[in-house]
Image: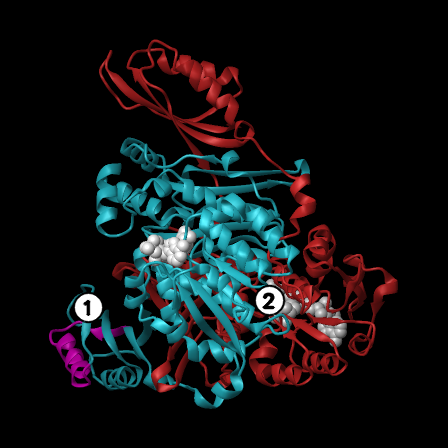
Chain colours: A cyan, B red
Amino acid sequence: MSALRIGLVGLGTVGASVWKNLRTQENLLTPRCGKILRIEKVAEKNRARARQADVPEAQLVDDWRELARDPSLDVVVELIGGTDVAADLIRESLSHGKDVVTANKALLAEQGRELTAFAAERGKRLLFEASVAGGIPLLLALREGLIANEILSLHGIINGTCNYLLSAMTSRALSFQEALREAKELGYAEADETLDVAGHDTAHKAVILSALAYGFWPALCEVHTEGIQNVDPLDLHFAQELGYRLKLLAILRSHPKRGEIEVRVHPTLLRKGHLLSSVRGVFNAVAVRGDVVGETLFYGRGAGGDPTSSAVLADLAFLARGKAVSRELPPSSGRQTALTLRPMAKILSRYYVRFLVEDRPGVLAEIARIFSARNISISSVIQPEGHRGQTVPLIVLLHQSQEADVQEACRIIETLPTVKRPAILLRVEDLEGEEGWSS
Amino acid sequence: MSALRIGLVGLGTVGASVWKNLRTQENLLTPRCGKILRIEKVAEKNRARARQADVPEAQLVDDWRELARDPSLDVVVELIGGTDVAADLIRESLSHGKDVVTANKALLAEQGRELTAFAAERGKRLLFEASVAGGIPLLLALREGLIANEILSLHGIINGTCNYLLSAMTSRALSFQEALREAKELGYAEADETLDVAGHDTAHKAVILSALAYGFWPALCEVHTEGIQNVDPLDLHFAQELGYRLKLLAILRSHPKRGEIEVRVHPTLLRKGHLLSSVRGVFNAVAVRGDVVGETLFYGRGAGGDPTSSAVLADLAFLARGKAVSRELPPSSGRQTALTLRPMAKILSRYYVRFLVEDRPGVLAEIARIFSARNISISSVIQPEGHRGQTVPLIVLLHQSQEADVQEACRIIETLPTVKRPAILLRVEDLEGEEGWSS
Ligand SMILES: NC(=O)c1ccc[n+]([C@@H]2O[C@H](COP(=O)([O-])OP(=O)(O)OC[C@H]3O[C@@H](n4cnc5c(N)ncnc54)[C@H](OP(=O)(O)O)[C@@H]3O)[C@@H](O)[C@H]2O)c1
Ligand SMILES: NC(=O)c1ccc[n+]([C@@H]2O[C@H](COP(=O)([O-])OP(=O)(O)OC[C@H]3O[C@@H](n4cnc5c(N)ncnc54)[C@H](OP(=O)(O)O)[C@@H]3O)[C@@H](O)[C@H]2O)c1
């Protein structure tokens, strides 16, 4: 099978995750792309990092130029950050006939117009899905999914640090400095927090979003940018009282009739009813309003090695699938035989079960005994008060159990003389990700 | 400029929207695709509908076979619904060398595996972004954006009718029948509601999602499917009490080590903290958990002519852009000169302004006068009580006004002897789409 030959520059947070996940996901990616995604060479200044990431010596070089100029590589992944060297690296790689994947929002905000033009002139691709909103496939949605729409407006929470700080200040009445100290301890804020809290990082991403939505790269210096460093807890308090929450937003809005675009970044009050106002902690969410589709929203982790590498790998997969192929479905023929549908009787779930019972002592104990004989344990009970001898509902919430066991237990319980009707059974799903929400 | 020559079959809710929006969006789509998307012929049994949609007689034919066999067409769009004729139409079109776009989830759930294989054998594409979650680019996200991920689980609210009914039953304590009557009056439920309320439509979409996520088409009859027709308001009440909300979900979960997939549809209790539990009314939302990216969520309108046509047009744009081209950015060269960035001074917004004032009679009146002289009107005021002569915060919320006017008014107000500090100014965004959320 042929391979996409990749040169990776930078083994920091994102680079090391790309290195790791390209291996762990190889069994998925190879059949999905019809090609092997193979990192041939890695350039990293910091040898300690390379060792930590388990990159074999033989694949390691010191100088990124070696990768940019290597005729055997198809694509260079730039994950060093910064703007000067990164720009040289990208231009040099494109000049030598390589496609480039980057997550470098600071560089794109500064030189995105020139760099994308430079790539287009050479018939090469410069892809940067990871530069905004981490693992959320937002640029893809703007580029392809919503292609038939004029983007009327976009409101994005796209800096996790700021959202963490504002969430902590709002929910626990911390001052900005207290919240910042905590965020640094938890690794949610950089040692130098300025880029994030002053709104610059959000402005970088807003510039990129404007390019995606409108083909228009605003000058970064012309994007109105206010950060959250001066947010006073007093205003969070009054905002609450008025029914609002404060979020740092990137706002884009088009005025097609006037040929004008708004691009701005500032702390913004959002009504508590809107779901953007409920996005908590380091999560990102972007509400996009299209003239045909109406309101849409995209939510997920906006930063961190793994989520960001998910987007870098998607760009690499796009290049691997090549100009001729696009995946409509993952290769099913192989898996269709390998996979089976788990029968309902065998699923594991939590359960809500309501019985109608005679209100007399011992009923609950008997029901509990029947469940427990099948290793099903009860997590809560609601037993509304009634009068002895009356029929009353009895609700039990069960810990994770197997469907077949729960069904069997219910059938047996239904034969008890004190149980008056077939049980009502509802399944309960405990989704992860709840930490990202408040309501 | 060359054109993608389209044959459209069916001018119902979705078909008529596709016809309309292909015209209204032409100025966006042509440059973005590098091609004109042109409907050459329309087949519709119902002449009255064709007239209503303003389809010229010359483009109208009675028999879809004419489109399927027309050598001058590149693609056929199937929007007639049903399974028998639609399957014939799709096969016949593919056999005659055309790509096909459809929104027909019932057909795909029944014959998706065969139809996609039929297309692949002929080197043609069968695209169906519109078949699940309407305008939300969810299939695209699974196919491309999250390509590097094993989908660990997917939880989807993907039937707007059921979500409307459960929302109404929960928030207003209606019975199922009452809610259904209301939904029919509002056009949120079909005359025959069975397909929706019995969970079949959700099961159709679950089958398609399984194909996208796992390349695995489960047999529809093997997908455990429970509807909401027997949901008892009593259980909604107890669920609330336990901290849960009831939603009809499609649930997918993979067990890679066992080679098993779960695909099931049933009313499900979700903890109120999770954002899926807050999705209200006819909106759709899908939480997707990938092993690399973590939790993501996609939200928007899952049905209706316009949202659904947004997805149909995206599929057509994909075909138009062709195998050689994929749009990284919308064509910017033309627009970069045509567009300008609106200066901050000229934006319109609502505002929150906090002053620190001396607590004495007449202060508010004076401030209000200065705003009103610039046509800025106040929507609310918070004036915490203090003692005369003390300084107290005074908060005003302003109706939509121009930034420059608000700034100017604040500068003047700050010169008043009773005003003690520069104003704190925060902007307020009123987002649409709030009806889809509760919190
Ligand atoms: N971290 C995230 O969550 C995230 C999310 C989205 C986008 N991004 C973007 O992704 C990029 C990388 O971010 P990161 O967090 O991974 O940064 P990082 O942890 O600082 O990693 C950068 C790595 O590149 C190395 N490097 C610097 N200059 C080099 C050079 N000339 N040649 C070879 N190696 C060089 C650094 O080595 P030294 O340590 O020796 O300098 C470091 O190991 C940035 O553009 C960032 O904005 C990051
Ligand atoms: N409506 C939505 O919101 C939505 C959302 C997602 C997906 N979908 C899917 O999209 C498809 C279309 O839905 P829809 O709501 O637009 O249906 P619809 O309003 O019932 O429209 C179907 C149209 O096709 C016409 N038709 C039927 N058989 C035909 C034939 N043999 N030749 C030519 N025309 C024929 C019908 O004419 P008659 O009236 O004379 O029968 C009708 O005008 C369905 O598969 C549906 O599941 C719909």
Horizontally, is B169 left or right of B376 in the view? Answer: left
Chain where mark 1 sits: A
Label 1 CB-ligand 2 distance < 8 A: no
Horizontally, is A190 left or right of B88 in the view? Answer: left
Label 2 CB-ligand 2 distance < 8 A: yes
Count the numbered circles shown: 2
How dense is the environment of label 2, judged by Cα within 10 Å: few (below 14), some, or many (20 and up)? many
Q: Residue at x 52, y 60 (%)?
A: A100
Residue B278 in sight from this viewpoint: no
Q: Which residues are magenta?
A: A352-375
Magenta span includes B249: no
Q: Amino acid at mark 2?
A: Ala
Q: Residue at x 49, y 42 (%)?
A: A251
Res A176 → quadrant: top left
Q: Amino acid at mark 1?
A: Val
Find numbered disc 2 in the image and state the secondary structure of the residue it sits on. Answer: helix
Chain where mark 2 sits: B
Q: Residue furthest left?
A: A361
Q: Residue at x 50, y 72 (%)?
A: A5
Res. B130 mark = 2
Res A246 → quadrant: top left
Position of B138 relative to B415 (above/below): below
Q: Which residue is mark 1?
A: A381
Q: Nearer the viewer, residue A97 or A100?
A: A97
Percent across and percent down for residue B207 are 50, 78
Horizontally, is A335 left or right of A96 in the view? Answer: left
Q: Nearer the viewer, mark 2 or mark 1?
A: 2
Find numbered disc 1 in the image and state the secondary structure of the residue it sits on. Answer: strand
Q: Nearer the viewer, residue A209 or A164?
A: A209
Horizontally, is B267 left or right of B141 in the view? Answer: left
Q: Residue at x 27, y 41 (%)?
A: A169
Percent across and percent down for residue A101 are 50, 60
